[in-house]
Amino acid sequence: MTQPNTCLMECSLTPEYVLDVLRDNYRHQQEYDPETWPDIELGFSTPVAQWRLACDLLSWQPLGRALGECWRFEASPAEWRAVLEPARVRTLWDVCSFIAVRGTRLDVVPSRLLGACCASGGMFLAVRELLAQAGADVARLRPSDAIAPFVDQHYAVFLGPVAALAPGKLPTVVVHSQRETKLQLLFVAGLIVAAVCDHFDQQRLAMGFLAAGFICIAITWAVHCSHIEFPGIVTFRDLVECLLADTAGQKNE
């Protein structure tokens, strides 16, 4: 049931929807996780073992807990083990149907504009609400605002609950990492260590540790300076239009 002052409501699931979300997660994950196995076609007949290998997933116990948190329900370890093990026998049909019976998903409530339902307004408010729940400052957020600062700081919201509002709609995420900067900083750190080893006196040792500390801070900064984007989506209006693309197309037919 819809809660007051929200554009999101919890709805029941179908195995097909759950599979769509799992496929969508895998599509994006291939871009940012080098441990994934690329280009594996996930379907209801896919063994759990192959799914876990493709998506670099955890063993059945932590995987079951994570799935329960994602889909908003609780199940006992014994129940999860029966669904996920033996991994070469159990399939994504077992997983998706198990989740569909117990879990829920978030759906968008259209907003009201001049007495009429407005799907785009509801979608924008829903995205804004999801960002607010993650701690983002959205008090002055407008559809014309750029999404880049929010994507970089709250990428998990866009790759998780926002993407799940319309599985398969978002362009595959692109991650621009500062790899060259990291390698340069590591090289400099190596020179500092070498210099300290060659000139082992207290003053230079202290300076070496101080410089190495600054290098570690800089490396940490570089790691968190990766830029994340969804090609073709610049503003929140673009994002809303992308998430509602099929719906808009049907209305125009």
Image (tube, rainbow, N blue to C red):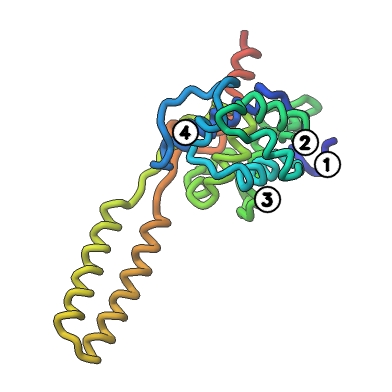
Say which residue label 1 marks.
3
Q: Cα distance, mark 1 to mark 3?
A: 14 Å
Which residue is tagged 3?
A: 133
Classify 219 as above or below 178. Answer: below
**Helix, strand or loop at disc 2?**
strand
SS class of the residue under badge 4?
helix
Rendered image quadrant of residue 8: top right
Counting from the top left corner in percent of width and height, residue 48 is at 57, 31
Distance CA(mark 4)–CA(mark 3)? 30 Å
* Residue located beneath label 4 in the image: 54
Pick the residue in front: 99 or 50. 50
Q: Amino acid at mark 2?
A: Met
Q: In terms of sequence position, does the residue under pointer 4 or pointer 2 come before the other?
A: 2
Residue at image point 34% right, 75% down: 213
Disc 4 versus disc 2: distance between alpha carbons?
32 Å
Q: Position of residue 250 (x, y in %)?
A: 63, 13
Left or right, 218 with respect to 115, comes to left
